[in-house]
Amino acid sequence: WVLNASQIEKIFLLSDKYKEMSDTMTGFWLWFPCEITGELIYNKKKWHFSINAAATAEWSDGKETIYWGCSREKCDDMFILPYPGRSYIGGGGKLIW
């Protein structure tokens, strides 16, 4: 699983932001043992990011953590396990939840 810089930017533009890992996040998204990590600058602040192959991500600056979830269909092809809250075609096959 590989993402280029353009795809990483697109994921964050399409994702919903959550201030905490709440029941909303844990109830709607899955987890997959595969992540892409890196660093970015946002609003003059350096963040470490981690994108999970199951359509979630985190930003952390060491003091604050922001959680992300990408439920839009436009995200499906960028993840191994896209958002499970609807039927979708992604990851090379049809998965129905």
Image (spheres, rainbow, N blue to C red):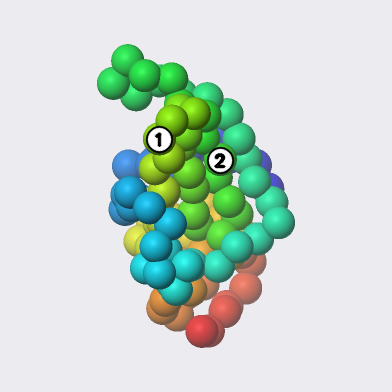
Q: Which mark is residue 31?
A: none
Of residue 6 and residue 28, the one placed in the foreground of this image is: 28
Amino acid carrying mark 1 in the image: Glu
* Residue carrying label 2: 50
Q: Which residue is depicted at the point 53% across and 52% down?
A: 78
Q: Is residue 38 visible?
A: yes
Q: Position of residue 58 (x, y in %)?
A: 48, 44
Mark 1 or mark 2: which comes first in sequence? Answer: 2
Q: As displayed, is residue 42 above or below residue 97? A: above
Local packing at callout 2 (Cα closer than 10 Å; few below 14, some 14-19, many 20+) is: some
Q: Which residue is depicted at the point 49% across and 47% down?
A: 57
Of residue 42 and residue 76, the one placed in the foreground of this image is: 42
Local packing at callout 1 (Cα closer than 10 Å; few below 14, some 14-19, many 20+) is: few
Amino acid carrying mark 2 in the image: Ser
Q: Which mark is residue 64?
A: 1
Q: For residue 79, which quarter of the picture? A: bottom right
Q: Which residue is depicted at the point 57% across and 29% down?
A: 38
Please identify the residue farthest to the left as the structure is shown: 43
Labels 1 & 2 near each other (Cβ < 8 A): no
Residue 25 left/right relative to 2:
left
